[in-house]
Amino acid sequence: MLLNLVPTADSFRIRVTYQRVSTIDAYGTLDIPGGTFDVLRKKQTEYRSTAVDVKVAPLGWIDISTIGGQQILPLGTDTITTFHFLNDVSKEAIAICTLNTSQNQVLDVQYKVMPPPAATYTPAVYEVSTYPNPVQHTLFVHFTDDATAAYQLQLINVQGRMVLEKTVTAAASEHDVSLPVAALPPGVYELVLQRNGVLVGRARVVKN
């Protein structure tokens, strides 16, 4: 028994100490399951030392790691080198590679599970026609939609200011919406069609 080496010992403890040294040593792109990411590579070297102490009265704790403890426990210092790949999509490393002692072979690779990319919504662009055009009193706007939605029709003057707006709720069908324009001064206007606030169509309108 280990305690037999020191007859007056009344207890013992296993002491493990760590020392880590980290540095950013490279940058580039990394392909992992889930995508390709711009990354910084952090090289981390960890020194882990294991020792055995015995408590001897009245001396206190004494390190006996060098007088036989190795026969029972894996004592000494281990060096562990890892590469941590850092990216701004995650607070943690998105990949960690553990190297062998010679640092020329990868022993283990861990990947962070990345969320799937967010779907990008591309609104449909509708063909918008107006009549009569040029117009004097009432402008009719014709468009076809593919679902029930709220549509906003706006007339924009050459100064970029909206001078007329109308909101309609339309189901999937062809539609003709009327806009009273008699009070508008003569000129060229841009008709803007929005679906739930997203631009889906334009047309040029001339007011006589």
Image: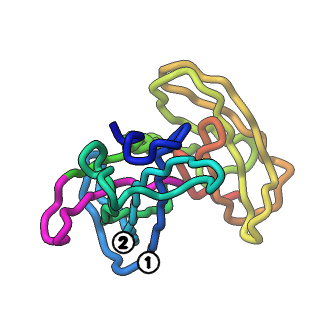
Outermost residue, right direction?
Answer: 183
Q: Mark 2 highlights which residue?
A: 43
* Residue 126 seen anywhere in this rendered image of the structure: no
Query: Is 106 on the left-hand or right-hand side of 123?
Result: left
Q: Is residue 97 magenta?
A: yes
Q: Mark 2 packing: few (<14 Cα in 10 Å), some, or many (20+)?
A: some
Q: Secondary structure at mark 2?
A: strand
Q: Is residue 72 above or below residue 133?
A: above
The residue that appears at 43% across and 77% down in the rendered structure is 23
The residue that appears at 24% across and 51% down in the rendered structure is 109
Residue 178 in picture, x, y percent from top left: 69, 34
Q: What span is in magenta? A: 91-107
- Say whether marks 1 and 2 touch (CB < 8 Å): yes
Residue 81 in picture, x, y percent from top left: 30, 65
Of the numbered discs in the image, which one, if any, rests on residue 23?
1
Q: Nearer the viewer, residue 141 or 14?
A: 14
Outermost residue, front direction?
Answer: 7
Q: Nearer the viewer, residue 189 or 100?
A: 100
Q: Label 1 amino acid?
A: Thr
Residue 59 in picture, x, y percent from top left: 62, 56
Q: Earlier in the sequence, mark 1 or mark 2?
A: 1
Residue 43 in picture, x, y percent from top left: 36, 71
Q: Secondary structure at mark 1?
A: strand
Q: Mark 1 packing: few (<14 Cα in 10 Å), some, or many (20+)?
A: few
Outermost residue, bottom direction?
Answer: 25
